[in-house]
Image (cartoon, rainbow, N blue to C red):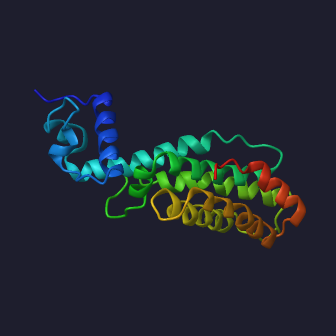
Amino acid sequence: MARTSDPAVRTRLIERAAQLLRTRAPLTLRSLVAGTNVSTMAVYTHFGGMDGLWKALRQEGFTRLAGRLAEVRPTADPVRDLTALVSAYLGNALDHPDLYRVMFDANFALENAKAADDTLEYLVQAAARGRQAGRYREQVDALELATQTWAIAHGLVSLVANGPLPRDTLKHGVPLLTALFVSVGDEPQRCRRSVWRGWRVPG
């Protein structure tokens, strides 16, 4: 009789894998199931093997990121909103540094190939609203601005979440984002106010 997939067991194995990554412990079939009260067969039942587990870990990272970004509600200030999305991005990476590292390991495909694009789309929409509101020049490409914004966030948090720099390094995000948004047309003083309103990252 075929074994059925239990979502609770799947989640337990993903959390266990994340714990092993966080402690730099070897991630093997046996170390994965140790202390979980499930057999090694569960890894095949839920993931089809270790390669499938790595795919699931990447997917879980983007799933959690999407959930965090979805919590940012649009306001009348799209520059504030784009900054708030960056703050959510940074907060998610700081809360799940182990999953964050795996998210960008392209050696393993995503279970849902659109997951990364879907998270970027939150930033694209905020950038488009900023252009529509006249905060950015009409010729500004929303996808390009969103990608530049993501690059700032990714660069900073990669140096902090799994890197050598202290958390207060993240405060550089404020002048970096302000400079970017001003460079595409926003008024400097207004931009600084908006960025500070959206910035919610402990540093």
In the drawing, does residue 16 fall left or right of residue 155?
left
Q: Quadrant of the N terminus?
A: top left
Q: Is residue 37 above or below residue 144?
A: above
State the image coordinates of residue 159 (x, y, percent, origin top left).
51, 64
State the image coordinates of residue 6 (x, y, percent, origin top left).
27, 28
Q: How many marks?
A: 0
Residue beneath the point at 72% across and 61% down: 174
Q: Is residue 71 above or below residue 78?
A: above
In the drawing, does residue 90 fall left or right of residue 110?
right
- Of residue 103 and residue 158, the one placed in the foreground of this image is 158
In the drawing, does residue 94 fall left or right of residue 137?
left
Q: Residue furthest left?
A: 1
State the image coordinates of residue 25 (x, y, percent, origin top left).
26, 52
In the drawing, does residue 82 fall left or right of residue 115?
right
Residue 78 visible: no
State the image coordinates of residue 70 (x, y, percent, origin top left).
61, 41
- Of residue 135 and residue 158, the one placed in the foreground of this image is 158
Quadrant of the rendered image containing residue 184? bottom right
Residue 100 visible: yes
- Of residue 136 and residue 104, the one placed in the foreground of this image is 104
Q: Is residue 109 above or below residue 176?
A: above
Residue beneath the point at 14% across and 39% down: 40
